[in-house]
Image: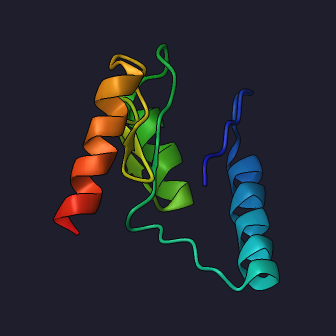
């Protein structure tokens, strides 16, 4: 699941995101694995604030998301290379 939150987040707003994720879990029967979840905070924020925001949500702070569902999230590769990596993953099992 990817969430984009483009305004300056307060503790209360981040708590609301956490509450909404809880509603999603109850409605869908799926779990959000916060141990595998991460967030990106745009530049201009002090590092201490970035880490504090991540700790409120209970996720890791990363500079950028490189993969989503096992696929490259960065558009640097050609489609041919992307699908080759998918094919290789399928053949490896």
Indicate whether 39 appears above or below 91. Answer: above
Residue drawn at (74%, 27%), measured in percent from left and top?
Answer: 7
Residue drawn at (38%, 35%), measured in percent from left and top?
Answer: 48
Return the residue nearer the eye: 15 or 91: 91
In the shown orientation, is residue 82 left or right of residue 26? Answer: left
Furthest residue in direction left, as rendered: 92
Task: Determine which quarter of the picture holds residue 84.
Answer: top left
Residue drawn at (17%, 63%), measured in percent from left and top?
Answer: 92
For the image, the number of numbered tags is 0
Task: Determine which quarter of the picture holds residue 21.
Answer: bottom right
Indicate whether 11 appears above or below 24. Answer: above
* Image location (x, y in percent) of residue 60: 38, 52
* Image location (x, y in percent) of residue 85: 26, 41
* Image location (x, y in percent) of residue 57: 55, 58
Q: Quadrant of the C terminus?
A: bottom left
Tell me how the rendering is colored: rainbow
Residue drawn at (59%, 79%), measured in percent from left and top?
Answer: 31
Indicate whether 9 appears above or below 59. Answer: above
Q: Quadrant of the N terminus?
A: bottom right
Return the residue nearer the eye: 69 or 16: 69
Return the residue nearer the eye: 90 or 69: 90
In the shown orientation, is residue 40 left or right of residue 83? Answer: right
């Amino acid at each position: 699941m990817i969430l984009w939150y483009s305004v300056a987040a307060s503790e209360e707003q981040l708590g609301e995101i956490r509450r909404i994720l809880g509603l999603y879990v109850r409605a869908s029967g799926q779990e959000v694995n916060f141990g595998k979840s991460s967030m990106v905070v745009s530049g201009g924020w002090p590092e201490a604030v970035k880490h504090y925001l991540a700790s409120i949500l209970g996720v890791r702070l990363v500079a950028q998301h490189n993969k989503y569902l096992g696929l490259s999230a960065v558009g640097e590769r050609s489609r041919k290379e992307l699908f080759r990596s998918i094919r290789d993953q399928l053949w490896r099992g």
